[in-house]
Image (cartoon, rainbow, N blue to C red):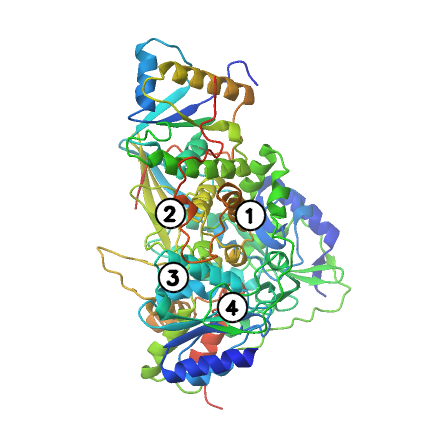
Amino acid sequence: MARIIAKKDLASWLEELLKEHTVIAPTSVGEFTLFRPIITPEEIALDFDNTVLSPKEWFFPRAESLFTRDGGAEEPVPQPIDKLVIFGIRPCDAKGLTVLDKTLYSTPFDALYTQRRNQATLIGLACSKPGPQCFCTTMGSAPDDASNVDIMLTEVDDGYIVETVTEKGKALIAGALLSESKSPPPQVASPAVIEGITEEMPESARERYWSRLADRCLHCHICAFVCPTCYCTQDRQYDSQGRVEQLRCWYSCQGQGFTRIGGYTPNPTKTDRMRHRFYHKLPHFPDTQGSGYATCVGCGRCVTACPVNIDIREVIADTKQRQPV
Amino acid sequence: MAIDYQPKIVGFMCNWCSYAGADMAGTSRMTYPPNIRVIRVPCSARVDALFIVKCFQQGADGVLVSGCHPGDCHYSEGNYHARRRFALLRELLDFLGIEKERFWVEWVSASEGKRFSRLVSAFTDELSRMGPRNTWGNQVDTTDQGQG
Amino acid sequence: MIQQIKDKAKELLDSGAVSCVIGYERASDGLTARPLFVYETEDVEKLIFDETCTHNLVKYLLNIKDKPTAIVVKPCDARALNVLLGEKQHQREKVNIIGEACPGVVETSWNKKGDDLEARCQVCTQHTPPIYDFLVGEPIEEPSPPSTFSDVADFEGKSAAERASFWAEQFERCIRCYACRNVCPGCYCTECQVEQVNPEWVSIRLTPEENLMWHVMRAFHLAGRCIGCKECERVCPVNIPLSLLNRKLQQEVLALFDFQAGIDEDTPAPLATFKKDEKLGIGEWHE
């Protein structure tokens, strides 16, 4: 029999957690949902496919001060790294954090990111049905994939099935009141896997393909900012009366002049930038590191948010090779 | 508000008329409140709309832009352009929560020292009555230029 | 109506009069629309035109200045084109305008289509484009009530403190994706002031005041040039009501200077000219 936490017990458990942790959960902001810190469990809004922005911003903020320095001394940035609990994170976003770890948590690692990751516990929420934009199964994840969270919750009629995945998760759930489930096991509907092409696109057609796709791109930063695995940044240094501060914020490879150095831009045209983005999201890491995972996790946020409907699922269908039937 | 509330005022004065008028007020020992911080510009048209918004963002409670009387601009037309620009900006600032009474655009010629001192006194009195301006957040950015 | 567009597009491409036709096609959700660039005759069949075609395609013309291009425009989009032609950003001979007599569009976002016409369409008084080479659709009788700025008036009813806290709350969400700037036909500077580092006008700190500085900068640079297509608001991923700022300036430009952007390509923008005797409520302090 599966162990569950009843919905009312969930609220009291979260109240206990709130005493010592900062709990980040999906909350309603206007007509959509965003991950925000909560003060009471009543603020949580669980009726959502997925949030507009991924929870990566709680580990890798949109804008943060990297360090400040007065005169000659290096003073640490007075940033308390809270003990975070991310409640209600979807399997695709949890996988997104694991993907980010490959870059930000491996040597040379990002000090602030690693501290936040170490201090945080992830309580996942399995998806009961895929949204129209979801395609996690194409990217190696699943609506009930628990491999990247500490605790996985799956909704049933009388509460949430609790699956403790890690020791950290076990320690966190220790104070909660669990019971036996009397509900039928959940039916998890998965999004269909995107079928690809059987023959590789000929070289001569590739320039034209990316150029046509890039025609309608506005080169804004939306796709990179909503993506759970994008990590490009720009830095600025501010100095005022001898005090120097380094500020880092998100940037996007689709912006004009991205990585322009000394007047030379590696990806000067929209076509180059578009190809760069999809190459980076899909075959780049498997090709160069043989690690088998793509950085896209199939959350579909870029599909929903792109104002001109540049759809990564269409790109996958047009470029992903599958075995001929 | 507290008795010791002192409004912070930023004043943009055009070099040829209003700055000279302010100078005249000073040399003639005409008194006016010290709340105003004067910034000299070549012409009132030099004052970009964003300077004004930045002043309010950085903590100013009131902004005064002063230039030559229309028709007397040292650069012939600057104040005509400034007039249109600030008429629009004042409406936009009001829309954002900074009342129209906090942004004054007045003409002061080089010989009008007395007018200048009375103008600034009136502005300071009005702002003292109104209190601190509404803010759009908690942080006031005190850092200088960014280097990319 | 759509057949007329397809036929015209085919004719222009076949004759070599244009190298590309910019129009709309069905998006990947099967419900809404997205921009389409037709270079070959066989792609003409993909063109659509219906109430989901909310996008303003005029911005794309600025990417293709050397070759003649045809573009499908609604009346509001055509006003944007007038602004660009007036500012010499494009040449009239290089643009072939396929104008639509437009009954209005609905609010769309991916996989969502509204039922009612957009608020701006409900008060629209110009259903026929002011500039076109070829008109598609039957001319629509113009309704008599003038367009109102009731949304602006409603907002002005709030107190100053309420207004300030409203904008602080809205701009707290801004992630500086710059989609609002990039979709706007009026924003075409090669280096935008917000990206300038020396001097830095707006820092990259994502606080409500810095975000507000950015949006005020943009709204003010569009004063007297914004034609009210509300694309900025449509593309915003966090639903900030950006067009309120632009609408306020549109209202003031109309009241102070009796000017509306994009009516024709020749009248200069109000901030580029002046009248010597106007007062505008400036400089009226007396002791």
Q: Residue at x 52, y 66 (%)?
A: C74
Inspect the image, locate mark 2, and give the three-letter code of the amino acid beneath it: Val
Name the residue beneath numbered marker 3. Answer: A254
The residue most toward the front is C277
Which chain hosts label 3?
Answer: A
Describe the element under mark 3 as helix, strand or loop: loop
Near mark 1 (Cα within 10 A), the count class, few <14, some 14-19 or many ≥20, is: some
The residue most toward the bottom is A325
The residue most toward the top is B29
Name the residue beneath numbered marker 1. Answer: C244
Q: Quadrant of residue A207?
A: bottom left
Inspect the image, locate mark 1, and give the three-letter code of the amino acid beneath it: Leu
Name the residue beneath numbered marker 4. Answer: A298
Residue A303 vs residue B84, the one in the foreground: B84
Q: Earlier in the sequence, mark 3 or mark 4?
A: 3
CB contact under 8 Å: marks 3 and 2: no
Describe the element under mark 4 as helix, strand or loop: loop
Inspect the image, locate mark 3, and give the three-letter code of the amino acid beneath it: Gln
Residue at mark 4 to residue at mark 2: CA–CA distance: 32 Å
Q: What is the x, y in percent for residue A183?
A: 76, 65
Q: Earlier in the sequence, mark 1 or mark 2?
A: 2
